[in-house]
Image (cartoon, rainbow, N blue to C red):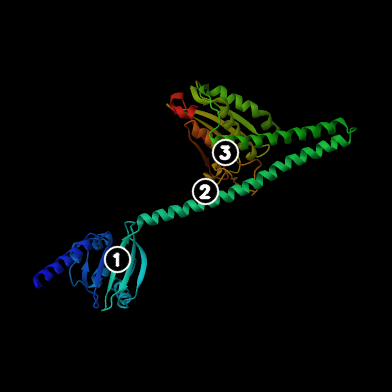
Amino acid sequence: MMTSARGMEASRVDLIVEGLAYLAQGFSIFDRDLRLVAWNRQFLELLGFPDELGTIGRPLADFFRFNARRGDYGVGEIEQLVAERIALASKAEPHCFERVRPNGTVLEVRGTPLPAGGFVTTYTDVTERKTWEESLHAAKRKAEEANQAKSAFLNMVTHDLRTPLTSIRSFAEILADDPEIDAGQRQEFLGIINAECLRLVRMINDLLDFAKIEAGRMDWCITELDAAELLKSAVSSVTPMFAEKHVALDLTLPREPPPIAGDRDRLTQVIINLLSNAYKFAPENSGRVQVSLDCGPTEATISVADNGPGIPPDKHQEVFEEFRQVLGTDAKRPAGTGLGLAICRRIVDHLGGRIWLNSAPPDGATFSFTVPRSPQAIPPDEQA
């Protein structure tokens, strides 16, 4: 009977030892003299210790010394770094902290004192959890920033819609109240009303286009296009505006430009938007805007360069984000909804191209985007 009980006890101990060996966590037990008495393989693997350190009676100082020599504790005299940690371990106080291994693994280290002295420590790989938490925090920050930007955008749009409406109403009331106003002034007021109406139309069109793109309701008509004719038409439509501000506008085309693929109306919208953006920042009387077309084997690149103040490198991605406007060097917010470049990016992405910005203040900015040379390069689901 006694033999049977001893056998059962031995089997139970063996089972416990085997179970500890297969734990996902690493664990170690050091006695009151800070010597190793029990451990599993995960303890050695998670902390990057060689097998020869895993021997009964091995002093804890040997493990600290190994870590110090490979630089885990930073710069310092080896024995001093070891002594500092031995002093802390000798207190045998409960502790829990996270440790980042040189390979990027994040370990949760939790130590518990034992009644007879010494302590048991567990080591848990929490790298995946930490990555998930950081991703969650980043997503939360981004959502909060987007919400703040959206609120600022709505406030800005409300203000920008009210401004031209107020101007239109004021000049309309003047014309209505004074039918005897002289012809020259009447023409001036009508010109202001017309300009403010066009400004309202542009703003509302931006809002509607962005809403359509977001909802996937934008109509697309993908065809083969004459790139040279497309650019000439877009440049011609803004030439009077540039001439009024005395900003030079040049178009450079290859000798025999090949056809491109895309939606004519949407590509025209992108080009005019980039031209309007360049016009806003080009200096009056000395401004220069250069439009160019460069054709590669599978895609064409259209660029719009200006000699304005430029945009800082850390803002190059931000300019394409919705609900954002990058301030000029004079800290003044440019006119408009701030959706123009965001819409350009969505259109170019939909057509299978790329859009980017090159700028090094104060030497102007160059916006470029690519379009495929063939309609077959545009995914079928993007052509609907």
Are the residues at dot 3 and dot 1 in contact (C-beta closer than 8 Å)? Answer: no
In primary-sequence order, the first of circles 2 and 1 is 1
Residue 169 pos. (x, y %)? 79, 39
Badge 1 density bin: few <14, some 14–19, many ≥20, Cα 10 Å: some
Checking the image for residue 310, the label placed there is none
**Nearest to the observer: residue 260 or residue 144:** 144
Residue located beneath label 3 in the image: 341
Q: Secondary structure at mark 1?
A: strand
**Residue 57, located in which quarter of the rendered image?**
bottom left
Asked if disc 2 and disc 1 are in contact, CB closer than 8 Å, the reply is no
Assess whether mark 2 and mark 3 are in contact (beta carbons under 8 angstroms): no
Residue at 29% in and 68% down: 121
Q: CA distance from mark 3 to mark 1?
A: 53 Å
Q: Does residue 114 show up? A: yes
For numbered disc 2, what is the local secondary structure? helix
Residue 225 vs 191, above or below: the answer is above
**How would you rate the neighbour count of disc 2 (Cα within 10 Å): few for under 14, some for 14-19, many for 20 or more?**
few
Numbered tag placed on residue 122 in the rendering = 1
What residue would you read off at disc 2? 314
Q: Nearer the viewer, residue 125 or 238?
A: 125
- Crowd tier of the residue under label 3, counting other residues whose Cα lies within 10 Å: few below 14, some 14–19, many 20 or above: many
* Residue 167 against residue 92 in the figure, above or below: above
Give the structural element (helix, strand or loop) at label 3.
helix
Report the amino acid beneath label 3: Leu
**In the image, is 329 to the left or to the right of 126?**
right
Q: Kindly report which numbered mark, 2 or 1, lies closer to the viewer in this rendering.
A: 1
At label 1, the amino acid type is: Thr
Q: Quadrant of the N terminus?
A: bottom left
